[in-house]
Image: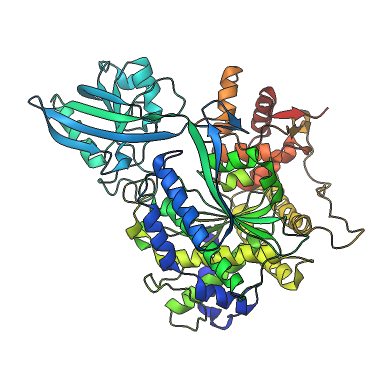
Amino acid sequence: MKLILAIVALFLPFAASAQKPPLLPEKDVAALAQELSGEIAKRNLEGITRFHRQRGSQGYRSAAEMVAERARAYGLSDIAILQFPADGKIYYGTQRSRPPWDAEFAELWEIRNGVAAVKIANYEAGPVNLAEDSEGGDVTADLVDVGDGTNQSDYAGKDVKGKIVLAAAQPGAVQDIAVGKFGAAGIVSYAQNQKTAWSGEDENLIRWGHLETFSPNKTFAFMVSLKTARALRERIAKSEAIKLHAVVKAGQHPGFTELVTATIPGADPKLRGEEIAFSCHLDHQRPGANDNASGCVTILEVARTLQKLISEGKLERPARTLRFIWPPEVEGTLTLLNAKPEFATRIKAVVHMDMVGGGPVTKSVFHVTRGPMSLPSFVHDVAWAFGEFVNEQSYNFAAGLPAAYPLVAPEGGKEPLMALDAPYSMGSDHDVYQDSSFKIPAIYLNDWPDRYIHTNFDTAANIDPTKLKRAAFIGAASGYYLAMLAGRGGVELYSVINASRSARMTAALFRSNQLSGDEKTTFMRNQTSYDSDLQRALHLFLGPPEVGFEVPNDNRVAYADEPKATGDGLLIFSRQSQPKGPLAVFGSNYFMDRAKTAGIATPKLLEYEGLWGSGEEYAYEVLNCADGKRNALEIRNVISAEYGPVPTEVVVEYLQALEKIGIVERAK
């Protein structure tokens, strides 16, 4: 990614003459640039961030109703809040439905001289103070420092039975040992945020905490800042007794997984049954501004803008239907695609937004993220063409050069966007769409890093309306273009694909310098193979233009000097038709749950660290590549080109584990 950024920066100063927008007619680009509003998006964001949007909760429902009301006001069609039963027993593909969770009241006080003297945490003032999936309780007990709290050695010589433990780890990683094994009554956690360059810099941050949804060791957990925790630890280290009083009214209950959906119907009788979807995730703790109220209000602004421009005749109604979806993260998307498979059949591509509004204070970098190598697609080239255009225009504007479309919001910043054309990374609903169960290519627009992600400081004040407008433009232009695309795509599309291919191969050459010998050769051949498969992906998207048209086959070219598979490397596996979805989901892990029951040791792949990826990413792509055509060595070569070299036997071990739990079957 650093190389790509350097290339972008190198050419931006000379971009003043390259003003013509890509792919869309200039009148369409001008209409979008004029109508899209970062201010409208931010006003909607300020509304959503008022709600503590935990799955199935009253706060989530309020946010969903607000989105539906705005969709109605904007004139969208087919508006619905879909409901799917969630009881902890029903599975939607690989997702075990999680019962909704609500909290009514929670306070944590320090007791001094027999009275509640110092309030440490208050749910009403700061919902992030109470860990998700906490159960009710009324406990007065001493506080015991257990360090991380995740290993038995952390409890050596400490009596925690009936006590409240102070732990550095997430509550979910602590509860089974602290509560289940040693009988603790509750947890106070000061778990830190996701690791970035700014981790630990602000001691006042309180991180969003989670208990395990399906753990039998039900308890409550409060989250406190590093500053608060250090003060408590210092007092305990001096042998001072600290007594706390915790009162919690919260818990899981029967209910539904809910999501909002709406459409802008397509115009072409032959294509309106196909859909281009805009996706986000509506659930999160309050305030959850960048993560992910920003994505939710940005696709809402895309919907408002496109509907208005189409109604006014400033944009042609697209051939395909545009669909907008506001679900709970991952589990909502998995539930929808499994419970209503017609959605998966109709959706041709997705524009997914998760964290797209972070202003300068968040230290965020905007990414236009490609899909996995297991699912080549030209849609990412389309998105990057618009992303690069915004880079050019926003840089020129900031530098005092001519810029017809700076996409600046009056209340927002004037900095250049400097978006990155980024390789595939996991972590949101785009993983579900691009899983081999569904094979729906997804454009992923996202900020990373963000110094305030999953903390009480992820507030609306940190959101930049200019950033929202620019993300909305990239998403709206990409989705609208794909919804209009018919025929064979035209010369300009092929030019965009070729330009993107050139940039990817430059980045691939840089990575290849970290390899040598056969690994380097295999790496470059798989990169080249990915690019050749884009042509097939384009034909599959567009469909045959006339009788007798044939989609190019996907048979990979074999090279005479290529290392041949032997032994277990010759094994071929294909994914079963059910269950559908990635194996690492929210609240449970489909693979690990079944592997434990079957007595399967944790495969080495899940803990493998490669040059550019780690265990979960390798595992995701190994399963995606198990198509009944590639042998184990060929799968190994694909994922090695994506994340770095991995031993073939490690890949085979994981495939055999998948076979034992019924996810794949071996070809005879």
Q: Is residue 487 left or right of residue 71?
A: right
Horizontal arrangement in the rendering, residue 657 relative to residue 286 (left or right): right
Percent position of residue 600, x then y: 60, 20
Q: Quadrant of residue 246?
A: top left
Question: What residue is drawn where x is 78% and y is 32%?
Answer: 570
Up-down: is 195 above or below 528?
above
Instruction: Give 208 or 226, whichever is nearer the viewer.
Output: 208
Residue 380 sits in quarter: bottom right
Q: Is residue 448 above or below residue 127?
A: below
Residue 664's x, y, as percent? 71, 30
Residue that protrudes farthest toward the left in the picture: 113
| Residue 447 visible in rendering | no
The image's colour scheme reads rainbow
**Viewer-side residue, 560 vs 572:** 572
- Residue 111 showing in the rendered view: yes
- Expressed as whole percent of the image width and height from the top left, the position of residue 522 reads 71, 47
* The one of 405 and 167 positioned closer to us in this rendering: 405
Q: Is residue 267 positioned above or below 178 on the image?
A: below
Q: How many marks?
A: 0
Q: Quadrant of residue 108?
A: top left
In the image, what residue occupies the spot 51% across and 73% down? Answer: 35
Left or right relative to 170: residue 313: right
Q: Pick whichever, 553 or 153, lies toward us.
A: 553
Q: Residue furthest right?
A: 548
Q: Looking at the picture, how far across and down is residue 56, in whole percent?
A: 46, 38
Quarter the C terminus occupies: top right
The residue at 31%/47% (across/down) is 456
Residue 460 lies, with reference to residue 600, above or below; the image says below
